[in-house]
């Protein structure tokens, strides 16, 4: 990941979501304490528990935590890996990424249709 100098980003997560996130990280961390992925999960879990701040917002209970870009990147990778492991069927979205800027709303069929419509006229 490209290094930026933007500093930490505050992430606010509701109580149910932070519990689900910590449960997921805990399960990843329990796989093998010597595994670097499990160690990353453990470090993120400890950071959220130690440095997270709870606060009420209207009728919701929230947790605020600051993540640096390397931590946010690791968190996204761990959560997506965990979700892929627990889901039976996953779809490959990689080829759709970035198409919305070039060809419409990320739908390759509509982009191809638009191109063929222009060439026919």
Image (cartoon, grey):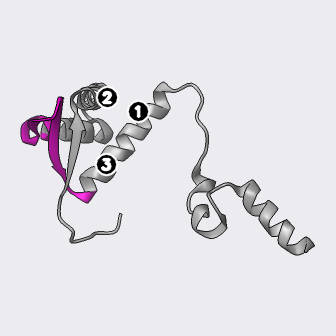
- For the record, the magenta segment spans 47-69
Residue annotated with mark 3: 74
Write the residue at 11% across / 40% down: 52
Task: Judge left or right: residue 78 versus residue 121.
Answer: left
Q: Is residue 66 magenta?
A: yes
In the displayed structure, would residue 38 be above or below residue 94? above
Q: Secondary structure at mark 2?
A: helix
- Residue 105 x %, y %: 62, 58
In the displayed structure, would residue 55 be above or below residue 30? below
Residue annotated with mark 2: 24
Q: Is label 2 in contact with label 3 (beta carbons under 8 Å)?
A: no
Residue annotated with mark 1: 82
Residue furthest front as drawn: 58
Q: Mark 1 to mark 2: distance in Å?
A: 7 Å
Q: Secondary structure at mark 1?
A: helix
Q: Is label 1 in contact with label 2 (beta carbons under 8 Å)?
A: yes
Camera-side residue: 59 or 113? Answer: 59
- Residue 33 x %, y %: 24, 31
Which of the two labelled residues, at mark 2 and mark 3, occupies the earlier sequence position? 2
Camera-side residue: 79 or 53? Answer: 53
């Amino acid at each position: 990941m490209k290094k930026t100098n933007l500093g930490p980003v505050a992430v606010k997560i509701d109580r149910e979501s932070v519990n689900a996130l910590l449960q997921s990280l805990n399960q990843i961390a329990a796989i093998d304490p010597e595994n670097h992925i499990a160690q990353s999960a453990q470090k993120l879990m400890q950071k959220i528990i130690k440095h997270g701040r709870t606060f009420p917002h209207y009728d919701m209970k929230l947790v605020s935590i600051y993540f640096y870009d390397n931590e946010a990147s690791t968190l996204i990778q761990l959560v997506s890996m965990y979700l892929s492991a627990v889901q039976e069927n996953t779809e490959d979205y990689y080829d759709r990424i970035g198409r919305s800027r070039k060809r419409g709303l990320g739908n390759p069929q509509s982009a191809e249709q638009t191109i063929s419509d222009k060439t026919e006229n």
